[in-house]
Amino acid sequence: MTINTIWFDFGGVLSPPIDELYTVYQRKTGVSRVEMEAAMAEVARPLGVHFLAPIELAMITQREWAKGMREALTRLYPDLDISRCNFDNHGEQWFQDHRVNPGVVELVTEMKEAGFKVGILTNNVIEWEYSWRTMVGLDHLVDLVVDSCKVRMRKPEPRIFALSAERARSQPSECALIDDLDENCAAARACGWEAVVFRDAAQTAAELRQLVGGAVIS
């Protein structure tokens, strides 16, 4: 079947690279990626899930997560100053001063104008929605948004790919995923999708154009 729906990841694709997000956050707060992820793992441990799952699946609220983060960081790194961390409004602090990837916006626009349905398939957080959607600014172009915190499933779970195809009214073989994580792309392919691992906008645009074969849907 011919691809008719192209799904773009948010974090690391439409947003700046994850390493850059963490680097900027460390400059703002003094807390490193290693420290943040260790604390998130502590918050997730009682639930037995991936360190991002508690908030990406809305298992706990941001306020509950914030309390857990403060406690975990204080316990793990007693000498660490976390006074500049605004965990109760983490999404706002995390995305502040960042801009959408312009090369990816151009690609989304190109695919939309060529007649493809375009969607955002993201592992994200309820309380962060306004911040990230405002940063992306693509609500006027995007046909569909599937957000892990709203559907209570997350990439790379097979169920989220089945749900996304269903919402697009497409067959799995008619969907393509653009994502910066190899495991998410591998999971999409295992579900019958096509996928392009995002490294940068130019590489992704070239691979996606090849994948769709220059097709233009009327």
Image (tube, rainbow, N blue to C red):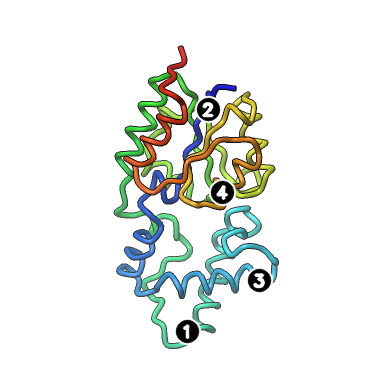
Give the residue pinned by disc 3: 45
Upstream in sequence: badge 3 or badge 1: 3
Residue at image coords 38%, 20%? 113
Q: Earlier in the sequence, mark 2 or mark 4?
A: 2
Amino acid type assigned to the residue bearing label 1 in the image = Tyr
In the image, residue 24 lies at what x, y percent? 32, 63
C-alpha gap between disc 3 and disc 1: 17 Å
| Residue at the top extreme, as displayed | 218
Categorize mark 4 by other alpha carbons within 10 Å: few (<14), some (14-19), many (20+): many
Please name the residue shown 40% across and 69% down the image.
85
Q: CA distance from mark 1 to mark 4?
A: 32 Å
Secondary structure found at label 1: loop
Q: Residue flagged by tag 4: what amino acid is it?
A: Asn
Q: Tell me the crowding category of disc 1: few under 14, some 14 to 19, or many 20 or more residues within 10 angstroms, Cα based.
A: some
- Comes first in the chain, label 4 or label 3: 3
Q: Nearer the viewer, mark 1 or mark 4?
A: 4
Whole-percent x, y for residue 109 in the image = 36, 28
Which is closer to the viewer, label 2 or label 1? 2
Q: Amino acid at mark 2?
A: Thr
Q: Quadrant of residue 86?
A: bottom left
Q: Nearer the viewer, mark 3 or mark 2?
A: 2
Q: Earlier in the sequence, mark 1 or mark 4?
A: 1
Q: Is residue 68 above or below residue 55?
A: below
Q: Earlier in the sequence, mark 3 or mark 2?
A: 2
Look at the numbered discs 4 and 3 and tell me whether their residues touch, using CB distance below 8 Å. no
Quadrant of res 52: bottom right
- Mark 1, residue position: 77
- Which residue bears the numbered disc 4? 184
Rendering coords of residue 190 (x, y %): 65, 42
Label 2 close to label 1 by CB (< 8 Å): no
The residue wearing badge 2 is 5
